[in-house]
């Protein structure tokens, strides 16, 4: 069986993933998706990995005015005005099934969660702010703790098949910008790896692509808002 999926880059860590029947929106911050939400006929699932404003924009909650059947899958620490049946808040290690989706939340090395999502035979991992936050100005103790926390969470994810991984490649980490990404690929071997969390520094993608030219994972390079890739994934 061959599964096809379309990926659209919104901005920063925000992506739209479209399968045959479903539309998934991850960590919406900026970007043009309203027309798809309002006019589309597919099931819509909106994910927010944590409450940082570059990952959670409260405007997403307004979309249910046009689409009352929209489903929200949010980190446990995101506060919403009122509990609604279509809002699901997940803690690390929680699982949930909604429609065609099977979702498991993993922990983060910042706040919130990361998501493993199975949809129509494809398994996606969106890291949120899970990363090896290897800041060059940190103390030796802080660096050791960051490494330990990240590697422990990667170990927890081991054994999961991942077709598509959305993961931070953050130029603010300077020479350590790719440490987490390289370790994630080495240990978990996703079929496709999609860098994110680079905001207005898309040129880091060229550097990362060159560095990873021998990677076992295919690197998908998004450098412009609205850019799309159609992906075919054999089972």
Image (tube, helix red, strand yellow):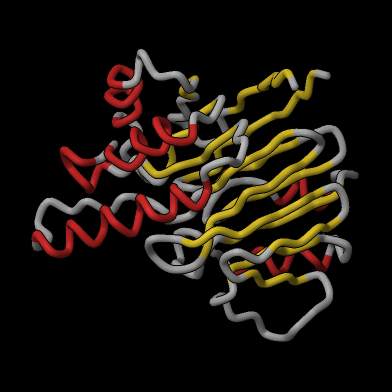
Number of marks drawn: 0
Instruction: Please tell me which residue lies in front, 160 or 203.
Output: 160
Instruction: Please tell me which residue lies in front, 197 or 10.
Output: 197
Q: Where, by quadrant of the figure, is residue 95 drawn?
A: bottom right
Q: Where, by quadrant of the figure, is residue 98 drawn?
A: bottom right
At a point 61% along the width and 24% down the height, the residue shown is: 229
Residue 192 falls left or right of residue 140: right
Q: Where, by quadrant of the figure, is residue 192 drawn?
A: top right
Q: Where's the N terminus, which quadrant?
A: top right
Q: Where's the C terminus, which quadrant?
A: top right
Residue 154 falls left or right of residue 27: left
Residue 53 falls left or right of residue 208: right
Q: Position of residue 68 (x, y in %)?
A: 87, 66
Q: Position of residue 136 (x, y in %)?
A: 12, 51
What is the residue that sits farthest to the top in this orientation?
Answer: 214
Q: Position of residue 151 (x, y in %)?
A: 35, 50
At a point 44% along the width and 48% down the height, the residue shown is: 154
Instruction: Please tell me which residue lies in front, 46 or 65.
Output: 46
209 up-or-down from 178: above or below: above
What is the residue that sits farthest to the bottom in this orientation?
Answer: 82
At a point 72% along the width and 86% down the height, the residue shown is: 82
Q: Position of residue 56 (x, y in %)?
A: 54, 64
160 up-or-down from 108: above or below: above
79 up-or-down from 179: above or below: below
At a point 17% along the width and 63% down the height, the residue shown is: 142
């Amino acid at each position: 069986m061959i599964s096809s999926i379309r990926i659209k880059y919104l901005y920063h860590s925000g992506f739209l993933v479209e399968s045959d029947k479903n539309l998934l929106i991850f960590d919406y911050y900026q970007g043009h998706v309203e027309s798809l939400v309002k006019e589309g006929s597919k099931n819509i699932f909106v994910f927010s990995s944590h409450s940082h404003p570059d990952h959670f924009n409260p405007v997403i909650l307004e979309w249910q005015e046009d689409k009352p059947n929209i489903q929200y899958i949010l980190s446990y620490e995101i506060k919403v005005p009122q509990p609604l049946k279509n809002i699901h808040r997940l803690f690390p290690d929680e699982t949930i099934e909604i429609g065609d989706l099977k979702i498991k939340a993993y922990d983060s090395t910042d706040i919130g969660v990361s998501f493993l999502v199975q949809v129509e035979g494809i398994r996606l991992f969106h890291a949120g702010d899970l990363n090896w936050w290897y800041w060059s100005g940190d103390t030796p103790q802080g660096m050791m703790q960051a490494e330990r926390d990240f590697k422990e969470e990667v170990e927890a994810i081991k054994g999961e098949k991942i077709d598509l991984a959305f993961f931070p490649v953050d130029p603010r980490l300077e020479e350590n910008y790719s440490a987490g990404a390289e370790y994630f690929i080495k240990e978990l071997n996703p079929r496709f790896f999609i860098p994110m969390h680079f905001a207005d520094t898309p040129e880091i993608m060229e550097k990362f692509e060159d560095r990873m030219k021998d990677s076992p994972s295919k690197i998908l390079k998004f450098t412009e808002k609205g850019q799309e890739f159609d992906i075919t994934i054999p089972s």
